[in-house]
């Protein structure tokens, strides 16, 4: 049977027999592009195939977003986008990608919009060269919206004014093609719709025999996608830096330092594919350097305050670049900074109390010690190791003691690290 037939209006009939369902529920990053590229390019019009992308994303990279739009436009099969489930959103980069869909659906309780790149803000002047990025994106989404028969003006406002719309308003204002809460709604929204595929009008048909198959990310794509999450990469970096700081404070165990190094390596993998502001990253690194210096320099908390300020500002601007649709949630930044501050307070109190209570090694006279080891006995003289005030001293005595017995220190020799003891 021929794939296409002509109706009286000369429109082609595209009967979908195989619908591939993909799911994007993370940031728009190279892992997402690789997943979509490998999955969508395998689809063939000759097999009566189409793709449905379930979308829920906070944003991502501008360059990656444009690559995904180009990918959709190059295909010989229709691509539909469904913003789902309830509570999901296609914000920032997601809204731009959604504008490229041949048919666009939203579940109730979802939203679309707020597509102004984070690094550009709302105060861009016409004389500012960065406004070119806004103009470029506006031209892109309005062109796509017009090609798909949608409200180009409101898609423009998603970028120029960071407007956002819920499903009901989006349907009313012709931003989407239908509200869909399940696959039956999707099927009804596709069947009989006319779209333009590579400039040619085609009418879509679905049948009861249409197969719906899910395509998931492979292991490599899934792992890369996890590390490309800005929250994951940031938390790994903060945890790694904190563990290295702990290693500097209490060296010798190497466990904290080793785990911290692994966390930093994993964070670096994420940073490689995320839009990183190196100035902000430098502020975060500077904050931990200041925390370390606080342990060795008496600054009465000034270095710690400067370190906290550097950590806050570095965290807020870590992913703010001209290629960015990403920003850290304020709650994540506040939680991380609060944890660091609490840790610094606890460590500071421990160090302060330790310095206040611990006496120099030569002030053990009149202290109570414990026999920790019997080394040797010769000519009636016994050599002991005595633990006093957390330190181990040597002692020689004609009296016999047993391990664990408490003794009193009555005299000491600082040069030879020897003490004289007596029974309590």
Image (spheres, rainbow, N blue to C red):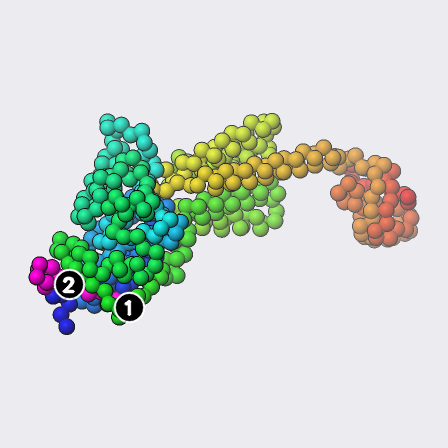
Residue 385, percent from left and from top: 80, 48
Q: Residue at x 18, y 67 (%)?
A: 46
At label 1, counting other C-alpha atoms closer than 10 Å, the crowd grade (few under 14, some 14-19, many 20 or more) is few
Residue underneath mark 2: 13
Q: Which mark is residue 329?
A: none
Q: Residue at x 49, y 51 (%)?
A: 262
Report the front residue among 412 and 158. Answer: 158
Q: Are marks 1 and 2 in contact (CB under 8 Å)?
A: no
Q: Which residues are magenta?
A: 6-18
Give the answer, above or below, for where 401 lies relative to 128: below
Residue 18 appears in the rendering: yes
Q: Residue at x 21, y 46 (%)?
A: 150
Residue 76, percent from left and from top: 18, 59
Residue underneath mark 1: 211
For numbered disc 2, what is the local secondary structure? Answer: strand
Of label 1 and label 2, which has the lower sequence position?
Answer: 2
Residue 208: say if magenta: no
Residue 8: say if magenta: yes
Tell me the quarter of the image containing the C terminus.
Answer: top right
Report the front residue among 174 and 283. Answer: 174
Q: How many marks?
A: 2
């Amino acid at each position: 049977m021929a794939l296409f037939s002509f109706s009286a209006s000369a429109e082609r009939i595209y009967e979908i027999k195989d619908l591939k369902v993909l799911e994007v529920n993370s940031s728009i990053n190279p892992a997402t592009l690789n997943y979509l590229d490998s999955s969508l390019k395998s689809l063939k019009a000759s097999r009566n195939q189409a793709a449905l992308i379930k979308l829920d994303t906070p944003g991502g990279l501008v360059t990656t977003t444009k690559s995904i739009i180009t990918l959709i436009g190059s295909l010989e099969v229709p691509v539909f986008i469904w913003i789902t489930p309830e509570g999901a959103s296609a914000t920032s980069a997601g809204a731009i990608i959604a504008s490229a869909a041949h048919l666009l659906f939203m579940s109730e309780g979802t939203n679309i919009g707020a597509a102004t790149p984070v690094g550009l803000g709302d105060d861009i002047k016409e004389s500012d060269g960065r406004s070119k990025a806004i103009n470029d994106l506006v031209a892109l989404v309005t062109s796509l919206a017009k090609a798909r028969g949608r409200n180009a003006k409101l898609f423009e406002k998603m970028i120029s004014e960071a407007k956002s719309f819920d499903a009901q308003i989006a349907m009313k204002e012709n931003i989407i093609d239908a509200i869909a809460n399940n696959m039956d709604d999707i099927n009804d929204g596709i069947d009989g719709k006319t779209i333009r595929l590579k400039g040619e009008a085609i009418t879509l048909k679905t049948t009861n025999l249409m197969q719906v198959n899910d395509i998931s990310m492979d292991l490599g794509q899934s792992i890369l996608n996890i590390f490309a999450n800005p929250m994951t990469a940031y938390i790994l970096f903060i945890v790694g830096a904190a563990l290295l700081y702990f290693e500097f404070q209490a060296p010798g165990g190497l466990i904290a330092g080793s785990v911290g190094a692994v966390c930093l390596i994993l964070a670096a993998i994420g940073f490689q594919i995320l839009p990183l502001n190196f100035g902000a990253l430098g502020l975060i690194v500077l904050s931990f350097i200041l925390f370390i210096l606080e342990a060795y320099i008496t600054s009465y908390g000034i270095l710690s305050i400067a370190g906290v300020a550097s950590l806050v500002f570095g965290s807020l601007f870590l992913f703010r670049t001209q290629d960015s649709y990403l920003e850290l949630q304020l709650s994540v930044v506040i939680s991380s900074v609060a944890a660091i501050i609490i840790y610094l307070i606890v460590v500071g109190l421990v160090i302060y109390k330790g310095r206040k209570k611990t006496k120099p090694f030569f002030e053990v006279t009149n202290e109570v010690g414990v026999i920790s080891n019997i080394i040797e006995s010769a000519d009636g003289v016994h050599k002991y190791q005595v633990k006093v005030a957390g330190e181990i001293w040597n002692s020689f005595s004609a009296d016999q003691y047993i391990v664990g017995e408490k003794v009193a220190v009555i005299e000491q020799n600082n040069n030879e690290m020897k003490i004289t003891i007596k029974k309590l």
